[in-house]
Amino acid sequence: MYIDRDKALQLSIPPITLDVERGRLRFFAEATGQTDPVYTDLDAARRAGHRDLPVPLTFLSNSIELEQPEPLAWLAVLGVDLNSTTHGEQSFVYHSLAYAGDTLILQRRITDVYLKKAGALEFVVKRTDIVRAGELIAEVDCVIGVKHPEVAA
Amino acid sequence: MNIGTELPPLEIEPISRKTLALFAGASGDHQPVHIDLDAAKARGLDDVFAHGMLTAAYLGRLLTNWVSQESIRSYKVRFVAVTPLHARPTCTGRVESIEGGLATLALTVTLPDGTTTARGEAVVAVTLP
């Protein structure tokens, strides 16, 4: 069964408030093999002109949203079998860097639903606007693929 | 920076179960298919596999090793194949075009057997405003 596109585009997804912590950014650096001290050492970050540890390029992705309780409830409510999904694409448009110490609001909505491979694969595009004190600092798109094995490609 | 300039490739250490456990905690993506063998098998897979966003993070390192993060205007990654456990990804990038002070880079992540796991694109300001 395919997603009801009109319902998806009107779906209200609760926003997330995220307090960015230095320790968490250091952990992310360790987990991704990042050795550039700008991302872990406050003095190095300040010498490079940053006011605190910068949030790296991909930290504010779908992954951080998955930390919420029942993170894919917005997808399940559209009738999607959560075992049939894949992460197809992730994209970022950056307007301003985020830093440790920032409180960010992640405002989410579905912006597109479309089919490919003769209906065997359905894609849902979720847009997350990253807002700091009313300012849009990044726009993040997550494209989730939903497999429809019942449809022959 | 010129059209055709290749970024210094970034070679990643083999991806271990520990890598995936740490990335799950650090990134927020705790989906069991990446860290729990039982869950992977229940889904019909032989083993856990790497998070797409781990690949995206490595490719992001390729970029910020080369230019400062504030010059990066946009970044997009498409996941085209699964990255299995123990894989050794290599991240590469090439300047495809330069126009209006912005360079467009084509990005690729490949495995030693030739599999491309991700393709990406980034737009980078050539001179800071």
Image (cartoon, grey):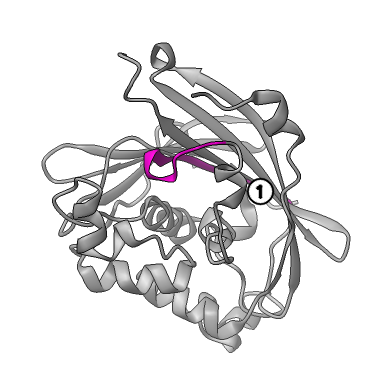
Q: Which residue is mark 1?
A: B127
Could you say which is closer to the camera, residue B54 or residue A62?
A62
Q: Residue furthest bottom?
A: A43
Residue A12, x across and y down, in percent:
76, 45
Q: Is residue B70 visible?
A: yes
The residue carrying pointer 1 sits among few (fewer than 14), some (14 to 19) or many (20 or more) residues within 10 Å by Cα, namely few
> Residue A36: x percent and y percent?
44, 74
> Is residue A94 highlighted in magenta?
yes
Residue type at numbered disc 1: Thr
Q: From the viewer's perspective, is B42 left or right of B70?
A: left
Q: Position of residue B16 (x, y in %)?
A: 20, 67
The image shows residue A136 at horizontal and vertical percentages of 80, 53
Secondary structure, mark 1, is loop
- Dot 1 falls on which chain? B
Q: Name the residue at 47% across, 67% down.
A: B27
Number of numbered discs visible in the structure rendering: 1
- The residues colored magenta run A79-95
User: Residue placed at 23% from the left, 55% from the top?
Assistant: B40
Q: Seen from this angle, which residue lies furthest top?
A: A118
Residue B68 against residue A44 in the figure, above or below = above
